[in-house]
Image (cartoon, rainbow, N blue to C red):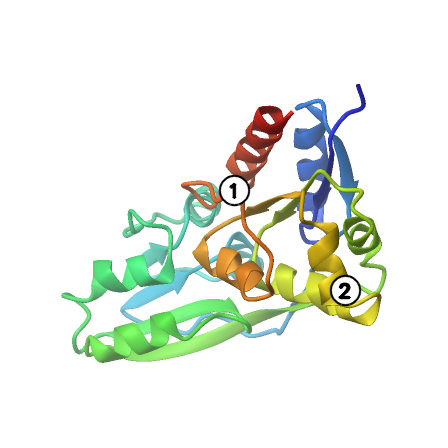
Amino acid sequence: MSKPTIAVLRPDDNRIAAAIDYLRSHEVSPVADPMLKVRPTGESPAVADYCVFTSQTGVEIAVDQDWHPGEATVCAVGQQTASTLRDSGVAVDIMPSTFTSAGLVDELATEVNGSTVEIARSAHGSDVLVRGLTAAGANVHETQLYRLNRPTAAGSSVTLATDGQLDAILFTSPRTVEHFCEIAAEQDGVPALQRGVAETVIGAIGMPTAQAIQERGITVDVIPDTVGFTQLADCTVEELATRH
């Protein structure tokens, strides 16, 4: 029996290599197709009472710029973001129990009135944090640390998906979904992609990613409880085993 074929769409850095190694340990055949290229903007987090990070990438860029929290209360959305901060020697003061921007707004809503809040993240974040914290009375500033561009070589997995040759696809962010479907539109069209993945297990990290997939007429089969890649891979492999 052949190994299940799973497309992994992580950024084109060490994360794609780690993802491939992890999937191989599950006895599956990974298809590496990086859908994101990180482009730092050169900006640095501003000084504020609260400093919010929403991704591992944002933390790594800030640390590379020799950023230090000073007296700021450091907030992290997601376990990987928090782990990267701690690994960099930065204490995490607040991490919402639900790993979403809305969860962080709920966590901070009663304490940020009159405070300054710095949101250090990509240029593609939703306005949930800004709107929610502003409504709570905070003076909110956003620094766009990086952009997520589409690699020029991306697209091999889209062709396989449209042809119905993938057993599963792992989507890790709304931007990944956007780039994947952009390529599909440039190739045979999104309706052809929808038909091609009708029997494919679709895994998504987080509700924003799942919603981006559903908005394009594709059913999401797996949404793990946390925002870590390993759990997404584990849950997807389990779903494949159940089906076969």
As displayed, is residue 26 above or below residue 32?
above
Q: Which mark is residue 163?
A: none
Q: Please report the residue visible at 20 percent of the width from the left and 75 percent of the height from the top.
A: 136
Most distant residue in the left direction: 110
What kind of element bears circle 1?
A: loop
Callout 2, which amino acid? Ala
Judging depth in this view, the residue of 53 and 173 nearest the camera is 173
203 horizontally vs 103: left or right? right
Coordinates of residue 103 in the picture (x, y in percent): 30, 57
Please name the residue that numbered disc 2 is placed on: 184
108 horizontally vs 92: left or right? left
Coordinates of residue 61 in the picture (x, y in percent): 57, 60
What kind of element bears circle 2?
A: helix
Judging depth in this view, the residue of 8 and 70 nearest the camera is 8
Q: Is residue 207 visible?
A: yes
Judging depth in this view, the residue of 84 and 202 nearest the camera is 202
Most distant residue in the top direction: 1
Q: Please report the residue visible at 17 percent of the width from the left and 78 percent of the height from the top.
A: 114
Q: Please report the residue visible at 47 percent of the width from the left and 41 percent of the height from the top.
A: 87
Which image quadrant for residue 195?
A: bottom right
Which image quadrant for residue 117?
A: bottom left
As displayed, is residue 171 above or below residue 176?
above
Which image quadrant for residue 68?
A: bottom left
Callout 1, which amino acid? Val
Please name the residue that numbered disc 1 is placed on: 222
Q: Please report the residue visible at 43 percent of the width from the left and 45 percent of the height from the top.
A: 89
